[in-house]
């Protein structure tokens, strides 16, 4: 065999070896991704919530976390991180590793209200998070002190027209209750006077003694006061459907006042840049958990309305909410920093 033939043969062999090595390198590079996708999760997941133990998001998170842990075969540990209207937990999530192991139960305050009213947040609501699934909402009701003498929204509107700026409501500035009252003012064409409070519990106590006239609040906050003296009257439901616990109380929209919604929604997000396989697996697990009868019973007892859906649907929900709240905040000149 000539030296030329050997060289040509060697060249062909070398080319084949190089090609084979390239395929092997590619396979090796892809193997960890495929392996991670198939085995995720392989360790404990942490779920950050924005209230103390026993608070609203804690009550929501724990039965879901228990069921998701059962589905995934790994512990899902609830980590309570209250404070700064959810901004502390949101900031911690924004600084976490994008590995799919730090979950955050975000709320309307985190992803729509705070961005609409605050500039100096420790996170960027649009860029720092990847939506996984919308899980639930807490319906708000419009509750008035019984001594006010009104029984529905039209009667409250008529009273406000007789006393411009004289009908007062309790709220925390920039909260869902605040925005619901602004929506009602716009829909009813009347002016109400907002009285700031640190929390709805104190506003509700003051309502009973006449310091304020009405509040928007979760039904669980005022339910025990219905029919009491002093007590409250539920004028309407701030949702697009009636509350199962109060089937005879119409929504505010049913009474002719459109666009008056209230409450807070909650959804699972990850740090942006988290693997697609983690988003997909968590979405499947949470949707499955939310269909569990035991989980549903616990959440319904606590006053939550249950959702489910895709990451894309949750992302669109967030975008819609931001537009609504930014518009209201600009019109009412609400800027908290």
Image: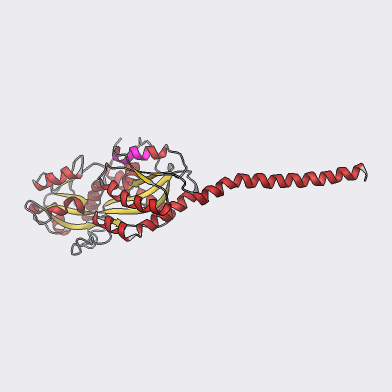
Most distant residue in the bottom direction: 248
Taking depth in this image into account, of 247 and 69 the one nearest to the observer is 69
In the image: residue 24, left or right of residue 259: right
- Picture coordinates of residue 237, whole percent (x, y): 22, 58
In the image: residue 152, left or right of residue 44: left
The reply to whether residue 259 is in sight is no
In the image: residue 75, left or right of residue 38: left
- Picture coordinates of residue 325, whole percent (x, y): 32, 48
Q: What secondary structure is the magenta-colored segment mainly?
A: helix
The stretch of residues the image draws in magenta is 85-90
Hey, which quadrant is residue 102 in on the image?
top left
Taking depth in this image into account, of 106 and 180 the one nearest to the observer is 106
The answer to whether 231 is drawn above or below residue 251 in the figure is above
- Picture coordinates of residue 76, whole percent (x, y): 38, 47
In the image: residue 10, left or right of residue 199: right
The answer to whether 239 is drawn above or below residue 116 in the figure is below
């Amino acid at each position: 065999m000539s030296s030329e033939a050997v060289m040509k043969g060697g060249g062909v062999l070398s080319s084949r070896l190089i090609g084979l090595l390239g395929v092997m390198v590619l396979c090796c590079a892809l193997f960890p991704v495929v392996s991670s996708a198939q085995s995720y999760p392989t360790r404990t997941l942490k779920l950050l919530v924005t209230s103390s133990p026993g608070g609203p998001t804690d009550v929501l998170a724990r039965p879901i976390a228990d069921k998701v842990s059962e589905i995934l075969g790994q512990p899902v540990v609830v980590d309570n991180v209250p404070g700064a209207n959810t901004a502390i937990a949101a900031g911690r999530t924004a600084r976490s590793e994008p590995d799919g192991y730090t979950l955050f139960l975000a709320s309307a305050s985190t992803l729509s209200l705070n961005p609409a009213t605050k500039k100096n947040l420790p996170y960027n609501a649009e860029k720092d998070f990847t939506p996984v699934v919308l899980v639930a909402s807490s319906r708000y009701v419009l509750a008035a002190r019984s001594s006010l003498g009104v029984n529905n929204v039209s009667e409250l509107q008529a009273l406000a027209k007789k006393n411009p700026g004289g009908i007062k409501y309790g709220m925390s500035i920039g909260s869902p209750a605040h925005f619901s009252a602004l929506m009602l003012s716009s829909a009813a064409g009347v002016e109400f006077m907002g009285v700031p409070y640190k929390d709805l519990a104190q506003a509700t106590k003051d309502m009973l003694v006449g310091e304020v006239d009405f509040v928007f609040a979760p039904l669980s906050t005022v339910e025990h006061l219905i029919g009491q003296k002093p007590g409250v009257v539920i004028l309407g439901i701030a949702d697009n459907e009636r509350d199962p616990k109060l089937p005879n109380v119409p929504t505010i929209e049913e009474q002719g006042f459109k666009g008056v919604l209230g409450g807070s929604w909650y959804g699972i997000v990850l740090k942006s840049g988290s693997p697609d396989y983690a988003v997909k697996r968590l979405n499947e697990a949470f949707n499955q958990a939310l269909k569990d009868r035991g989980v549903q019973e616990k959440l319904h007892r606590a006053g939550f309305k249950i959702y489910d859906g895709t990451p894309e649907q949750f992302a669109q929900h967030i975008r819609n909410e931001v537009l609504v709240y930014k518009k209201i905040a600009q019109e009412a000149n609400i800027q908290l920093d």
